Amino acid sequence: MNSFLVGLFIRDKNVQTAFNVYITNLCVVNIGYVLQHFPITLFNEWTPSVYKAKEFCVLQRTLSRTFGALIVQSHFLIAMNRLWAITSPVTYRNYHQLHSVLRPALVCLILWIWVILVSGIPGIVFDVWRPHTVAEAIRCFPGSVNPLYWQRTTQLVVNDIPILITLLIYPYICYRTWKDLKVRPANVGPQPPTLRTGDETTTAPAQAKRPVDHGQLAEPSQRQKRAARIGQQFFTLSLLVLNVAVLQLPTQVFHTLLTFGLSSFGSPMVRVVTVLYSLTSVLDPIMFLVSIKTFRHAARTYFC
């Protein structure tokens, strides 16, 4: 499904919007996570008789750590994009008006570089310095074996804080969305009726003008389109926050406990959080296909 959304973005120009760049970026991250996580993990777990070279173990931990962080950061990027669009729509439109696809693509590229520099490359360096143990020749250790200060710092900065911010800004976005969707009277109304009394023509007293709300569009059709757009954006963000709260938050809480020595990989929660985190990559494209009109219309056109 992730590949399907990426294909729709490539082939359909109507899907190539600024916001959909961030969605496509997350789909690419999900594809990378699925392609590296399941084959390498299954090979590591199911082949104890096969010798595991040090390079293989370093590759497994690096890819798992990097793509796991990219999933969190990509969700965080979408949440911040929605926050920007709702709180400052004028600057948001002006920023994306010129080169609407290139600018978000540059932001996504910077995100990848940031995660690789902070989480990927230092982990490789620490892993290479560490000697390859006899136990890892049978089965690579799935967790990080790097210095604790680095593990804890990256866990908090790259994974925990973005999830916390995503969850905390949601109530504020709910408030702003409710405020924007409130129906306020517009400064446009019918002209006062003309009354004819005998040979004299008089005009009925005009009603006092209602307060002007510059944040509300006067035309009902424009107001409805604006309300529909805001509602769609809020629906997409709500599904994303639900995904983060249900699937990602328990996983990152468990890994935080691991890095601070409050849990172990022998815990039965390992399998639970692994399944939860894997479901993120499965549910993301379904969520976006349901909530984003351009993807939904392109998919309908593709099949029909």
Image (spheres, helix red, strand yellow):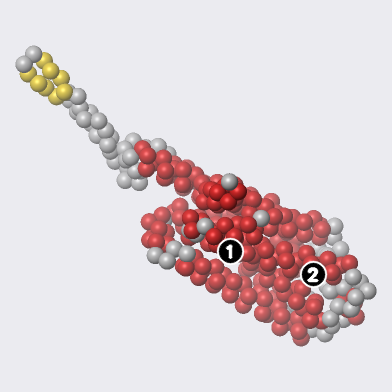
At 54% from the left and 51% from the top, the residue drawn is: 298
The x and y percentages for residue 180 are 43, 44
Residue 5 picture location, percent across and down: 60, 57
* Residue 139 in view (yes/no): yes
Q: Disc 2 marks which residue?
A: 40
Residue at far front of view = 304
The quarter of the picture where residue 41 lies is bottom right
Residue occupying the point 60% across, 60% down:
6
- Looking at the image, residue 52 sits to the left or right of residue 187; the answer is right
x and y percentages locating residue 167 in the rendered image: 60, 54
Query: Where on the picture, by quarter, is residue 30?
Result: bottom right
Q: What's the residue at 73%, 58% (across, down)?
A: 278
Disc 2 crowd, CA 10 A, few/some/many (<14, 14-19, 20+) = some
| Three-letter code for the amino acid on which mark 2 is drawn | Ile
Report whether residue 76 is seen.
no
249 horizontally vs 224: left or right? right
Q: Is residue 297 left or right of residue 160?
A: left
Report helix, strand or loop for mark 1: helix
- The residue under label 1 is which amino acid type? Asn
The residue depicted at 42 percent of the width and 59 percent of the height is 92
- Pick the front one: 52 or 246: 52
In the picture of the structure, the residue carrying the numbered disc 1 is 25
Q: Residues within 10 Å of mark 1 (few under 14, many from 20)?
A: many
Tell me the SS state at disc 2: helix
Most extreme residue toward the right is: 49
Image marks 1 and 2: residues in contact by CB distance under 8 Å: no
CA gap between label 1 and label 2 equals: 23 Å
Most extreme residue toward the top is: 198
**For the N terminus, which image quadrant?**
bottom right
